[in-house]
Image (cartoon, helix red, strand yellow):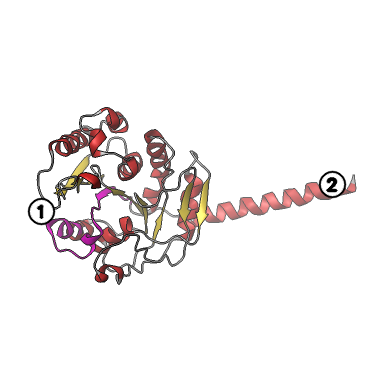
Amino acid sequence: MILRRRRFLSLLAANLVAIVNCRADAADWTDAVEMPTLFIGHGSPMNAVRDTAFTRGLRAWGASLPRPVAILSVSAHWLTPGTTAVSTAARPRTIHDFGGFPPELYRIDYPAPGAPEVARRAGVLVREAQVLHDAARGLDHGTWTVLRHLFPHADIPVFQLSIDYGQPASFHYRVGQELRALRRHGVLILGSGNVVHNLRATLRDAPDDATAATPWANAFDEFVRAALSDRDDRALLGYEARAGAAMSVPTPDHYYPLLYALGASDATATAKMVFAGFQAGTISMRCVQFGA
């Protein structure tokens, strides 16, 4: 009986400590300027060093945004089939996850700090999956090549959420919805991919920032534009039935980040088309902002 009573008192004390800690965390989790959500077509890693209409547009876009407390990036280049993870590194390294590019690209460092505490809180918001913590994960090129233009000083904390590649489109949209609360705490949610992404069919002689592409790429990109303008989220979730989808999204890794940005936005938020164009004929560089 005495042992049971001691056990009960021990558990009660532990629970009281946990409640106090949760309240302290909540007190620290203050409101900030509510952030929009973004989707960026990141295209080739070479965009990190190119001076084009696309990269100049990113720089102007970044200058127009309110300053975030932290940035959450969902990139096409962190796929974790069967699980969802969040990066909790205090100093995330710059990952050069590509091959065959000029040496200058591998020398680039984007030394933004991490946001371990914000990342852990983001993980708690997700109910669709048990989110694992990855303290070794750095920033892949889907993240740093665009942030290098948006926020060139690398002084805003950045963390990433992985994509469970085994889940359907609806799952990624719902996770985005669960992360929506981060925005009122000053967290900028960024999806980085491409709504049309077919490397096998690229046109090597196509100019950067072309306004047109192959007919099927144009058709699918136009479908996405129209559905975003109408906020027809259901159509975007059912993208596979649309004209040109089989060629435009042969694998959904670059499409899924759009669904995180879409889900994290307010349902009535207008989708502002910030940039449109193609690289290599089959890579849509469409960029979208949801909310002010």
Q: What residue sits 32% from the left and 32% below the top? A: 237
* Rendered image quadrant of residue 271: top left
Q: Determine the secondary structure under disc 1.
A: loop
The circle on residue 207 is: 1
CA distance for labels 1 and 2 = 76 Å
Front residue of 94 and 262: 94
Is residue 214 left or right of 239 when viewed as pictured?
A: left
Q: Which residue, as the protein is rendered here, is positioned at the far top?
A: 241
Disc 2 target residue: 5
| Labels 1 & 2 near each other (Cβ < 8 A) | no
User: In the rendering, at what x and y percent does residue 206 appear?
Assistant: 11, 51
Is residue 113 left or right of 226 when viewed as pictured?
A: right
Q: Determine the secondary structure under disc 2.
A: helix
Quadrant of the frame with the N terminus = top right
Say which amino acid is labelled 1.
Pro
Vertical arrangement, residue 58 with respect to residue 171, above or below = below
Front residue of 38 and 101: 101
Is residue 88 highlighted in magenta?
no
User: In the rendering, at what x and y percent does residue 180 appear?
Assistant: 38, 43
User: In the rendering, at what x and y percent does residue 276 appear?
Assistant: 15, 46
Q: Residues within 10 Å of mark 2 (few under 14, many from 20)?
A: few
Which segment did they paint magenta?
A: 34-58
Vertical arrangement, residue 141 with respect to residue 37, above or below = below
Discs 1/2, front: 1
Say which amino acid is labelled 2.
Arg
Q: Closer to the N terminus: mark 1 or mark 2?
A: 2
* Rendered image quadrant of residue 171: top left
Front residue of 100 and 118: 100
